Image (cartoon, rainbow, N blue to C red):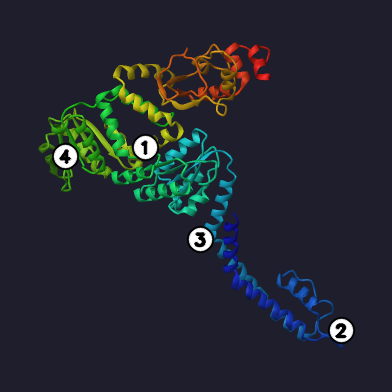
């Protein structure tokens, strides 16, 4: 804090050095002249010049245009002439100084220093756990909005001023510390609270793989124990991040390719995963059934290559056709050198016999052109499109492809899942192992409590810190508390909460969709899906003895034997 203050003070003194020297000289010359010029008394007799104190006093109120009169006696003509000169000198000096101060207030360096000071004070005052978001692009903004919804504090760093200005205008529940600075610099991350005990994670989600790699490496060296969530669009960058144990590396293209393969194998499983990983409150995703057969991939960049590799793993090697304007090496697949925006290359690739097409180029307009042309040639085609910029959402919604991969949304959803509900990634891996019938059963239980919207997903950890009331009962009595106690309203115990247990972890063992009568143990971890209101009620039940007492016994006071346990 003192470093920032010292830099501001040094900057002000350096910028105001010349005006201060000018004002000191003007005052010194004015005072020195008055103490040299003789005065005159009422009888017209010459008197001694003014003292230094009288001269300083007179110049002080005259230079500031206050005016008070001629003291201690009326001035001689020589003194009046000199005072006239001093008045003009001091007015010019004050004008110059005031203009210099106004110019200083607009100085970019001073504004940056003041902003760093305000930012550091806000971070220092954060007493709740928080995370650092590096990069407030479309991905970072979506993450910030969702974290604000789940009441998790965060700090934002970005090299651009525009996103931070939009952040200030946003409707956020809490004040968000934000700084226009380069998160790759160690000093910036330290200023953002990297080494503070309240800092729980760092998200490197800029649009540059190099920047994300530098941030992840800096965090690993400066604070090895803190989780790092990083975005990487190139396989080499992801491998580099994994080499120094980055906790969670998000490759949006490989992730979406895996999800597309899941949709082909088990459409209900894909719908269940999408339902659990999208932003809470958004519309429930539709059930999609990508067909198995001949697929055309237009664009063999990072996304197209990931799709092809995953289709190959499913045994569709001979049914893949690639269209790309560059001379690539498409792993022995049949390929055509073209952008794919006109009909001829699509016809040559067999569009009329194909069952699916992926518009995978890095240009949104080209992807739209490819998709429109392909649908005209084959109206029954299953179309998957890549959308790089959220600003083009209206165009993609107007076309209405079967599936649209929005890069920023894919990254944001993956980061949020890991950050807010770490168990969700493990549950998704379990979903991928299950049958379609199992996924359909899970969806049938989940959809009625969702009201057509993506549910809120949370984790309950039964321990002294997270669930003190529940843990005390489990460890100090022989009472068996079923899972249904966490699914019961503490306002009316005859009403169930809109909450569905998805998975329980006990001593490293996984239990999928545990039954309501399953007994709870201290140390259990349970992942839930449901409404935000259910989450809030469940927290009250596990944290406060009266609420738990009512849920278990129907009595809200301390007159029951369970209430007496809490009072002992």
**Badge 2: residue crowd in 10 Å (few <14, some 14–19, many ≥20):** some
Q: Quadrant of residue 476?
A: top right
**Could you say which disc has been placed on residue 409 in the image?**
1
From the image, tell me which residue sits under label 3: 108
Mark 2 sits on what residue? 41
Q: Quadrant of the C terminus?
A: top right
Mark 4–mark 2 CB contact (< 8 Å): no
**C-alpha distance separating marks 4 and 2:** 106 Å
Between disc 2 and disc 1, the foreground one is 1
Coordinates of residue 484 in the picture (x, y in percent): 50, 15
CA–CA distance in space, label 2 to label 3: 55 Å
Q: Position of residue 421 (x, y in %)?
A: 44, 31
Of the residues under marks 2 and 3, which one precedes in the sequence? 2
Of the numbered discs 3 and 4, the one sitting upstream in the chain is 3
| Pointer 3 or 1: first along the chain | 3
Q: Earlier in the sequence, mark 2 or mark 1?
A: 2
- Residue 61 visible: yes
Residue at the (32%, 46%) spot, across then down: 237
């Amino acid at each position: 804090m003192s470093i920032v203050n010292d830099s501001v003070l040094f900057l002000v003194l350096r910028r105001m050095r010349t005006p201060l020297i000018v004002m000191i000289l003007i005052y010194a010359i004015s005072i020195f002249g008055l103490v040299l010029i003789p005065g005159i008394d009422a009888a017209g007799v010459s008197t001694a010049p003014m003292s230094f104190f009288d001269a300083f006093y007179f110049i002080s109120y005259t230079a500031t245009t206050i005016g008070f009169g001629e003291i201690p006696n009326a001035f001689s003509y020589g003194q009046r002439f000199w005072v006239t000169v001093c008045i003009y000198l001091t007015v010019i000096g004050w004008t110059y100084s005031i203009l210099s101060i106004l110019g200083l207030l607009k100085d970019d360096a001073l504004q940056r220093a003041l902003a760093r000071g305000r930012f550091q004070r806000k971070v220092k005052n954060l007493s709740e756990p928080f995370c650092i978001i590096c990069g407030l692009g479309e991905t970072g903004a979506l993450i910030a909005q969702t974290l604000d919804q789940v009441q998790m504090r965060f700090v934002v760093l970005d090299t651009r001023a525009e996103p931070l200005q939009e952040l200030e205008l946003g409707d956020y529940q809490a004040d968000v510390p934000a700084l226009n600075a380069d998160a790759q610099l160690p000093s910036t991350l330290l200023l953002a609270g990297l080494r503070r005990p309240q800092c729980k994670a760092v998200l490197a989600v800029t649009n540059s793989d190099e920047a994300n790699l530098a941030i992840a490496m800096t965090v690993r060296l400066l604070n090895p124990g803190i989780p790092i969530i990083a975005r990487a669009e190139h396989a080499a960058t992801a491998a580099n991040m994994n080499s120094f144990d980055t906790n969670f590396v998000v490759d949006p293209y490989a992730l979406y390719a895996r999800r597309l393969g899941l949709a082909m194998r088990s459409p209900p499983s894909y719908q269940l995963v999408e339902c659990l990983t999208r932003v809470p409150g958004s519309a429930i995703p539709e059930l999609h059934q990508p067909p198995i057969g001949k697929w055309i991939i237009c664009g063999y960049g990072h996304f197209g290559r990931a799709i092809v590799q995953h289709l190959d793993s499913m045994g569709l090697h001979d049914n893949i056709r690639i269209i790309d304007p560059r001379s690539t090496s498409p792993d022995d697949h049949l390929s055509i050198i073209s952008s794919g925006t006109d009909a001829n290359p699509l016809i040559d690739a067999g569009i009329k016999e194909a069952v699916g097409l992926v518009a995978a180029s890095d240009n949104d307009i080209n992807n739209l052109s490819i998709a429109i042309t392909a649908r005209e040639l084959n109206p029954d085609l299953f179309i998957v499109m890549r959308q790089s910029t959220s600003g083009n959402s209206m165009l993609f919604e107007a076309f209405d492809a079967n599936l649209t991969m929005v890069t920023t949304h894919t990254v944001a959803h993956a980061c949020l899942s890991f950050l807010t509900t770490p168990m969700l990634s493990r549950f998704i891996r379990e979903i991928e192992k299950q049958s379609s019938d199992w996924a359909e059963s899970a969806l049938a239980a989940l959809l009625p409590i969702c009201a057509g919207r993506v549910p809120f997903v949370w984790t309950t950890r039964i321990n002294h810190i997270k669930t003190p009331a529940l843990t005390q009962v489990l460890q100090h009595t022989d009472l068996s508390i079923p899972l249904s106690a966490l699914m019961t309203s503490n306002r009316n115990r005859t009403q169930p909460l809109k909450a569905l247990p998805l998975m329980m972890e006990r001593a490293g063992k996984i239990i999928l969709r545990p039954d309501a009568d399953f007994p709870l143990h201290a140390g259990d971890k349970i992942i839930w899906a449901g409404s935000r209101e259910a989450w809030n009620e469940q927290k009250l039940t596990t944290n406060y003895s009266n609420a738990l007492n009512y849920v278990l016994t129907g009595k809200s006071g301390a007159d029951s034997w369970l209430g007496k346990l809490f009072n002992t």
